[in-house]
Structure formats: C-alpha cells, structure tokens
Image (spheres, rainbow, N blue to C red):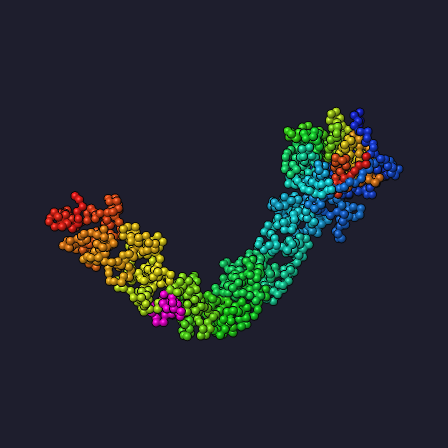
Amino acid sequence: MRWPLAAALAVAAVSGAPSQRTDSRSCALCHLSWMPAFLDEGRNGELMALPESNVVNSVDMCFSCHDGSVVDSRERVFLQHGHSTGVTPPEGMEIPEELPLDAGGDISCATCHTAHGTDMRRMDMANAVFLRVENQDSQMCAMCHGETMEGLGRRNHAVGVDLGGGWPEALAQSVATQGQSHQLVCQSCHAAHGSSDENLLALPMDQSQLCSACHTGHLPTGDLARPGNHPAVDNCTTCHRMHESESESALLFRDNRDDGLCLFCHTDMQVLAGSRHHLSETAPDLANASSLTPRQSGSCSGCHAVHHARGPLLWAREPAAGAAGDGALCLSCHAEDTGLGLPAIGDFSHPVGVSAASLGDTGGLPLFDDALRREAAGDVGCGTCHSVHETRLRRSNEGDALCLTCHGEQAEQLAGGHHDLGEAGGPCASCHAVHQAHGPGLAARPLAESDAPAHERVCRSCHGDADWPEAGSPDRHLHPLHSDDGDLRCASCHDPHRLPEGGPSTRLASAGDSPLCRDCHARQAEVVGSSHGRSSEDLCGTCHRFLDDDGSRRLFAAQASEDAVAGLCQTCHTVALHSHPRAVAPDASHRPDHLPLFSARGERGSDGVITCATCHNPHDGAASDFLRPAQEGDPALCVDCHHGRRAVAGTAHDLRQGVAGASLCAPCHRAHPPDNTGLLWGHDLGPGPDFVTQACTGCHREGGDARPLAPETTRHPSEAVILESPPGIPLYDIHGRSGGAGEITCATCHDVHRWTARADQDSGGEGTVLTSFTRPGVAEELCATCHGQEALVRYLLYHRGQRWGRPALVPWSGE
Amino acid sequence: MGRELTAPIRIPAAFCLFLTVALRAGAAVPLVALEEAGQLAPGGAFALSMPSAAVRLPGDQWAILDGVNDRIVITDGEGNGLRTLGQDVLNAPLGLTRSSEGLFWVADSANGRVVALSVSGDIEAEHTLPRTGRQPPEPVDLAWLQEGRVLAVVDNNNHCIHQLDVLSGEWGATWGSAGTQLDQLNHPFTVAIGPTGLMAIVDVINSRVLCREPEYDFNFQIGEWGVDAGALYRPKGVAFDRFGRVWVTDSVYGVVQVFTDSGDLIAVAAEAGEVRHFRTPTRLAFDERGRLAVVEMLANRVTLWSIAE
C-alpha cells in the first residue's frame, strides 16, 4: 500500500453500498464540511464545530488517512521536506488556474493534488498520487517553474537530456525519477515529497552527493587528498548555480573569463594582473591539458583546473615527470622540451623538494609539504624564492640578498676568505648559478675538461686551470675520491665556504691528533695510545701522505720501495733476514682466507702480495704485536694461509698444552726468528747432520721434551742418498729447504703436522715407527718406491743388522 | 447502531459510577472526566517521531512504538527514555503488544511481517503474513486472542484479520473482506480483545468499530458516521478497560469516546467539564491502575489520564 489516498473514495467500488449513501458519504470522507449536519443543517456537531472552509485543504485531513491507517506517509510526506504549503507563491510567479491556491492565496496540498486526479484513469490506487496534471515529464512543475525549465540556454541546469539508459544507481536508490523517455526532468533532482533536503533534493548535498551521482568525475570533498577537483568550500553550489546562473559556461555563479569567479574568493590573487603569468593577456591561446585557453576560461585556467586537474594545486597541465615538489608544475612550461620557448631552468638548478631543516630560519620564505601546502617544516620549492602569481622574486637578490636569506651562514664563513671572489656583486654568484648552472653545486663556471667525476671537475674549473695557476690542483691530492655516485668528494674534506686566507684549508685539522682523518677512519683511530700513535704533532701524517709533493704518488711517508707497506714499516722496524717471506704472491694453496694482500703502492687488493700488513694491523694498538686476530675457530693466524697446518691441532705436536690463547704454531715457529734458521724455527735445535733432523731432535733426544720417543737412529744411511724423490716424498737440503732433490731426513717420511689415522687403528693411538706421523703410503711402499726388489734385503740390513754382524739401525721389536 | 440481535450484556453495573452528565449549549453530552496524570515525551536521542502505540510494562515502565524511527522506546513512568530496541530490524512498524513471557510482538508494517523481539532487541520469532488479496499484506496491529498462543493480526491492505498460532508459526483462519457490510472491512487499523473474547476492530474508512463475537459468529458495530456524540469519522484506536468498556479514539475529531460492549455510548472523554480534544489521537492503552494512555501521533507523545470513577 503506497498511495491509496483514494481508498476512501473507492468505498463504492468495493462495498456495493447504495449509491446515494456512497455519493454523499464518500465525498464527505474528505470533504468534512459536506457532512449533512454541516452542509444541510448548518450547525455545529457535538464532537466538532462547523468548519470555516468548504475546501479540502487541511494537512490534518490528509494525515487522517496517511498516518498508516490507510497509507503510511508519515515519513515521506509529513516528516521529511516537501513542497512548500501554507506560503504565498513568490512575486512574479504565475500560478495557472488548474492549480488552485487555498482561500488565503497560499499553496496547499490541494494545489497539486486532488482526489479526482488524472492519474486515477490509468493507475491503480497503490500508485496514483492524485496529481491535478500529469507530471511524469515535469509538465506540472513547468506550469509554475517554467523559468527553470528552459535549460542551458537560460542558464539553468539542462533538462530533457536523454540519459541513454544511464540512470545512475545512486539516483535509482533515491526518490528521484527520470522522464518517460529516460530524459532528465525536474524530479531527477527534486522530490516534491520524501526529500531530506530543504531544497527538495533527491540526494544530500553536504558532500554534493546529488551532483556527483551523474558528474562522477567531480567529487569535491574539501580535501586535497582527493586530487583533481577544487575543494568544495560548501558543495558544488559554492561555484555553480543550477538555476539562473550568471554564466552560461558551466552554470557558474559568476563569469570567469576575467577570473571574476576565482578572484571572488582568492582575492590575494589580484596581484596576477600585470604579471607575465596573467595569461589572458600574455598567452591568451595557451591551451591547458583540457584544451581550455585563458581567453575562454580566464588566466587562472592556464595553470589551474577546478576539475580534472593533473596534479597538486589543481594543476591544469601535465606535470613534468621526475621533477620534485612544485618543480613538476613549473617545469610543465619552463623546460626546454615543452616547445614553448619560455625560460628554462636547465639540468642543474637550485634543488626543490628537499628539506630546509639544516638551513634553520628561512627568513619568512615559504616551504611546502607534499601536497604543496605551506608548511614551516616543509621542503624548498620554486615558490620559496618565486612569487609565481606576481612573476617576481619574493625579494630582491641585489648583492645575493635573496640567497643570503637562507644561506647567510655560508656567506659569513666566506667573507674575506679564499673563495670570496666578489666578482658578481655578491658572495654567491661568483661560483653559483641558481638556474642553468654548468654542473653540481650550481656551478657558475664551465666545468673543466676532464675524465674526472663532475663534482671534481667543478673544482678543477679553477683549481689546476691554467688561468688560475695559483690555485692548488686536485692532482696533488693522494686521497682517492669517489665517482659521481659516491659520497666522497673534494668538499668532503674542504668546505669551499670556509677557506680563510692563511687558515686551515680543511673542514677539520689533519695534523695533531688528525680529527679530519678520524672523522671517516674511526677504526684506524684505535692506534691512538699505542706505539704507533704517540705523535702529538701529526698522528696520521707520521706515516701517511696527503699531497704528492714529489710526483711519486706515494701514499706513505717513506722512501719509494717495491713494497710500500714494508718500506714504511722498515722505516722504524728492522726485520731479521729469515723472517716470513714478504713481497711474494701466495700460490694457490696458500691464498689467505681473510688476511689482506697489498699492492706495491700499499693498496689492498686480492692480487697483491704478502707484506707486513698482511699479518699486522698497524692501527690496532690493542692487539699483541699489532697482529690481526685469528678468525673465529682457527687455532692460529698462520692457518689463514697455511690451511693444511690446521691438522696439527690436537696431535702430539700441538704443544699449547691447553693454555688458553696460546698459539698453535708458536711453540715451533716464529715469523721473525732472531737467528738465521730454516723453517722459521723458533725452538731449540738438537744434534743432527741437517736442519730438519736438528729441529726434530730438539725434542726427540735424550734430555729433550720428547725423550721417550727419541729414535736411536734418526737418519737414513748417508750412502743411500737419493737425488730425486718420487711424488709426495719430499727431500731436504741441509738447511731444511724442501724440494724434489735432496736427502732423506725425518720429514721425508713424517708429516709432523698430521697424525696418521692408521696409527689409531693399529696401535691404539700410540703409533709405531711405521705409522706415527708418517706420510700416506710410507708403511706399505716407501722403501720399495726407491729400492724396488732390494727393499726387503736392505730393510733387513738396515733394521736387522745383528744378523749381519753389525748393529741394527732400528731396534728390532719382533719377528 | 448497537446490537441488532440479543446478546449477553457484559457491562458491569458499576460502570455508571464514573459517568457524569454535563449540559452544554442546550445539548446533553455525557462526559467522563479525565485528569491528566502525566505524559511520555522523552527527549534527546529518545525523542519520538509520530508514535503509534504504547504498552505498559512491569516496573512502572512503558514501551512506545516510535514508528518513523523504526524502533521501540522504553521509558520510565515519568517519560524519561531508558533505552531503545528494534531499530535495526523494524521498518515503519505500526502495532505493538506484549506477551506474558516478556516478548514484544510488533506489526512490522513495511516489512509485511510480525516479529517478536526480546527485551534486548533480538528477533525471537518472525512470521511473514500470507498473501490473501491483490495487495501485498500490511500488518498494522495485533492483539492476543489467546494469551501467548494465538494472535489476531490486522492486514490493512487486504481488509482482513489473520490468526497466527505463534507456537506453531502457522497462520489460521482469515476473517473479513473489503466492503461495508458487517462481515466486511475497509482499511482496518487497530484491534483489541475484550475480557469476554469480544474482538473490536477499528474500521477506519467505514467510520466504525466492528465487533465480532467469535463464539457466536456474530458481528455488530460501535459508532456510526456523524458529527455528534457516539458518532465516528476517523476512528483509530480501540481498547477495553478492566470493566469491559470500549474506548475509541477519532483522529479528526480528536476525541475519545466510551461505549458499552454492546455498542451504546457511555460518554465522551472530557477535561474540566469540556470535551477533551487530543492531537491526532491514535491507539489507547490502560495501565494496572486503570489509567488511560492516549497516543497522540502528531504531538509526538503519549498522555496519561486518571479516570474519575
């Protein structure tokens, strides 16, 4: 049941009651004044006085059925907004006779509705609204509101436009309707009853929901976070008038060809007049991205679009790709590739979109947040220096005054200094160009021709240039610089703004305790307090050079050498002749796992050679003998290269004896032995004809540490000297040097760094003469390798000498 | 008007005690004196919008059907809002009653159903009206034929009364059709069941209260079309008091009249000796003290009245 107001009138149709009763009573169901007591007798009733009016125009009478007892219109008609009643039509509005006003000349329900409405002829009671005139295409609305029905030609929102079946879902869910031919009608926006809006709109307008139901690309929200549309101060009607607008263009409430609409609110933009950005005068046909020209839509439209904007600040043009901050907007015109021929900023220009926090006070120059709104803690933008609507700098740059607003501190540092050139009337312009600069740092001078990185070429434009012979050349500097992508450059050590005449040339002092060096080389600063760091005059300069005074390009403060590191060390340290080899490249089996190798110039490199700094870190004052630490898990620094020597750990030759921190190798070897010994031997020597035997008998002899294991015979018979050894069986000279030729000695058969696994199997870990620390295969075929079929005979002679009337060389222990 | 056949008289002899007779302007209109005892018009978030029914609750509380706000508002005896329920499930409800077990039974009109809500607002039962005519069913009121078991449900759109067995959920007999005869209705709106089982149905467009004696299958009407005492124009609400008297509102005349359960006018409700005109009075209810509650829809309130006995 929706609109059965006429249910009462239909009593006759459903009751079959006598027609006379139906005629009189049915009419009086609404026409209260037609009750017989009132109409015929003209008297008051006991329950109600005689009505004053003969017309059915009382809201209470309508409500007596529309309260739910016949139809429930409580909310739609009697609670929500509805067409005005009880008011006199405005002056000038002509009300046709077909739409009667009440006795007082006011609009009433009966002005539009009648129980005898036309729609009853073609609609059932549930759908009839009892209008006096059909209104599906707003015919009845137009009878009074004709002025608002004539479309854009009369500066009203268009009606009669074919929607093409595209009835928006938001409207379909509302009280709005479309015309019989699916065209826009008054009721597409307005509802005579059931609206929650005082203007009888079908949808709310607090967020312009009604407008955006059709104008889907226009969603003003008052929030710049939803880009593309002007933030609605109130809603769309802030700028637009749906009826009787002043402008035919977009139903604006003011014509905007002279920017009148924009300037109505943006009064501070009056300054645009007379500026080069007053585009309606300077570029009237410069179309924006929506093909609108300033001539058509005003100067503002050249840069700003209230709808379908391309970027922040309602930008009307395509922002420049890759540009930061408001630069993306400005560069949409001020770039070489736009073809507009406007001043361009070039490849090197003052940065925008960067924080100004390090500058401190910007002297009132504006900064901007990501949405390009002014923000005290924001970033630098084009608008920081430029007042774009006035086409001028925010303040004069006479004497670089604008620059000094932010960069005053640099100017103070510069004053009277080496770089205070004063060529261009101010301290800045001698070296810097704000736009169209030649290189990094806003270089004002053409960069030097060089293969060096651009930042270095900026310095070279003066330093090293033939026109500036007095300027120091970067070529004299030995400290390496990074590429353009790196961080280390000339200005890392030198502050070009702080170069007082006769004062320090670097940001921090390089002499003394070398704070300049230590600012980067913090780990090397551990040298302080050690024997390598006792100089209070020049901590780093004692060993290192920064300037190439003699053209040698030496990094170290020592005479030229084939091994620059060792050359530096030997400036102070005298190293024994038979020290660990240096200045040699390790073979493949001795490549260090972690220890560094160095070039002849002292630069680290994997293809370098072993030198002092391979094992020593001269800056690690806390380490014993400045030795680099062994890697975790390794028993000694030595095994980083001597990988196979790790095997000695845990054997009988591991002489650390459980002492924590003791070196695995040091009991036998020293890198810098005091004496002229082989094998870098660092232990006692025993008797023997050659160095290897002496090294072994240092322990394996009567009175030695390994006395119980002292062999009675320690050497192969001298008459059995072998000049050439088979593979894997080393021979040694008398100095202990191994090679393919030599004599048989202890280490020929024994690998003192590796315990023999077979010894554990055969003798419970004690081993025998044939298994203890013997090289692989010794037990099975060592003798036969050289002696062939005579091996047995010689063995018996050698080890069973008693049978031949001479003592056995090796005690016999059984058959 | 009145019974056309002999029927048991149920009016207690004491009913005449409250009756006073006032003479006004040469016409004798019997009046029953009312004295205002308060009103239920909660404010703030509990403000009513065109309420249509009120039900007395234990503990000196009232449940008011706040139909346009699609909810039930619970107030204390002073009309202060305590809580609401049903706002998420109801749609333009018009009728309300309560079962002895504490459920609110609502004629959820725009949803075409009867729902039972717990005191916390949960739906405990839901029964969609059967379609019996051309129009979609529209329940507008309901009353207990058998307390806690059988409801009489008014279908305004189809001019009939349905019976609902709330235990089985089955719809029983349907009574009435569109028309003006004594077994017909034209937009019935409210229903009340008297202490003897007499069913009183407000027949809005026929300007009467149609009474039905189910036991004898006998119908008669209270009130007839007219402007004088005892007549009706837009009857809306009907209620039986503890004596079995029939109280009827008329929203256009704004009056409340009292009839015997055989259809004879007893009196017109009055205040200070004058006929009391209410603002669109709709449904009526009585509390345990016999006070009359009048729902004034367009005044957005329920007024409470003590009856001079």
Q: Residue at x 64, y 49 (%)?
A: A210
The reply to whether residue A422 is visible in this rendering is yes
**Residue B164 covered by magenta stretch:** no
Q: Position of residue A459 (x, y in %)?
A: 43, 69
Q: Quadrant of the N terminus of chain B?
A: top right
Q: Position of residue A455 (x, y in %)?
A: 43, 66
Q: Dividing the picture into quarters, in which one does residue B147 lie?
A: top right
Q: Position of residue B256 (x, y in %)?
A: 79, 37
Q: Dividing the picture into quarters, in which one does residue B143 lie?
A: top right
**Residue A532 covered by magenta stretch:** yes
Q: Residue at x 41, y 66 (%)?
A: A517
What type of secondary structure mainly makes up the magenta span? loop
Q: Residue at x 24, y 44 (%)?
A: A762
Q: Position of residue A492 (x, y in %)?
A: 44, 66
Q: Nearer the viewer, residue A431 or A715?
A: A715
The reply to whether residue A733 is visible in this rendering is no
A194 with respect to A670 (left or right): right
Q: Nearer the viewer, residue A764 or A740?
A: A764
Q: How many numbered callouts? A: 0
The part of the chain drawn in magenta is: A531-555
A182 with respect to A519 (left or right): right
Q: Nearer the viewer, residue A279 or A414?
A: A414
Q: Nearer the viewer, residue A737 or B263?
A: A737
Q: Quadrant of the C terminus of chain B?
A: top right
